[in-house]
Structure formats: structure tokens, C-alpha cells
Image (cartoon, rainbow, N blue to C red):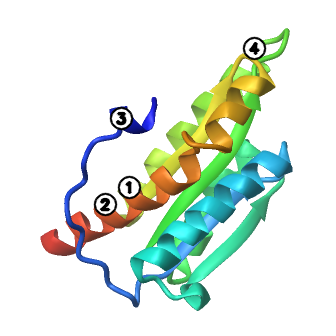
Amino acid sequence: MTKSDVPDFGKTQINPQWKIALVRSVWYSDLTSAMATDARKTLIAAGIPEKNIQLIDAPGSFELPLLCQKALEQGADGAIALGIIVQGATHHARLIAEQSAAGCMQVQLALGKPIIFEVLFVDALDDARSRAVGTDAKGSLAAKTLLTQLANVSKMS
């Protein structure tokens, strides 16, 4: 997806009191750190105070759902799950990717708080690199998506 493919989310009403958890896998930490940095910058530029943004490191992508759940239970209004999973010679990567996605979906539905799932499941690390840094980086998109979803959920409460 390129920037031209990104939908226009429209004008989002930002609540500067929202608390956001950025939960990132430490696998390929240079790339997940770049995604988290882009997300943080976008959130701050949108009006979320830096003190309301918490960065949580997860051992891997499989562990993202539980850490998102704990952050949401402890007061975060929304979370962004960031990770990179590279397909190898076995099916292990696919299992991790599917269960991480399913876990995040279960948590957000159970708690009624949004989790934006930005775990890149790729065939090669270069594919992840092109999506984690540069003009098509997913960290900023994840932040915009979370702010839009928080505004949508707030309107419905």
C-alpha cells in the first residue's frame, strides 16, 4: 500500500487525554523502533501529549496481545501492536502471525478498546524494511488509524 492508497480518514476529533500504548516486538528492533517512533511523532503532532504515550517492549509478536491487554486494563484507551515476522522454512511464522492477530482481535473485542494491528508478516526482511521506514512507513498510518478508531468509539459511547 502506498500513500495514494491510504483512505482519507477525514477530520478526527482528538481528545488530548487519551492514553496510548505502543507495544512493539523486539525482534528486528531497528525496524519496530522506527515504526514506534513514527507512530509517536504522529500522535504528538495530532495533539496527544508525550506523557500519555507508553512504549512497551514485547519479547516477540506472539506476546503482543497479552501486553496490549494489560496496558488497556491499566488505563490505556487504545494500543498499537507493532511487529515483524519473517516467513522461514517452517510454518512457525504463519502460526505466530495468525495467533498474534487473533489474540489482538479477541482483546479489543473483549475490552471494547481499539488495538491497531501493524505486525508485518513478510517473506523477506527487505519487504518489512520498505514498510517500516521511508515514505510508506506503517507507524504513522497505525497512529492515524488508532486516533480515528478512538474518535469513532468515543462517539458511540
- N-term-proximal mark, 1 vs 4: 4
Is 113 on the left or on the right of 30, as rendered? left
Q: CA distance from mark 4 to mark 2?
A: 32 Å
Q: CA distance from mark 4 to mark 3?
A: 33 Å
Marks 1, 3: nearer the viewer: 3
Marks 4, 2: nearer the viewer: 2
- Callout 1 amino acid: Thr
Disc 2: which residue: 149
Marks 4, 3: nearer the viewer: 3
SS class of the residue under badge 1?
helix
Q: CA distance from mark 2 to mark 1?
A: 6 Å
Marks 1, 4: nearer the viewer: 1
Q: Nearer the viewer, residue 48 or 94?
A: 48
Q: Residue at x 23, y 76 (%)?
A: 13
- N-term-proximal mark, 4 vs 2: 4
Pointer 3 local density, CA inside 10 Å: few below 14, some 14–19, many at least 20: few
- Callout 2 amino acid: Gln
- N-term-proximal mark, 4 vs 3: 3
Pointer 1 local density, CA inside 10 Å: few below 14, some 14–19, many at least 20: many
Disc 4: which residue: 91
Q: Which mark is residue 4?
A: 3
Q: CA distance from mark 2 to mark 3?
A: 21 Å
Q: Quadrant of the C terminus?
A: bottom left
Q: Quadrant of the N terminus?
A: top left
Marks 2, 1: nearer the viewer: 1
Q: What residue occupies the far top of the structure in this picture?
A: 89
Q: CA distance from mark 1 to mark 4?
A: 30 Å
Q: How far from the left and from the top, in percent, is residue 20?
A: 52, 74
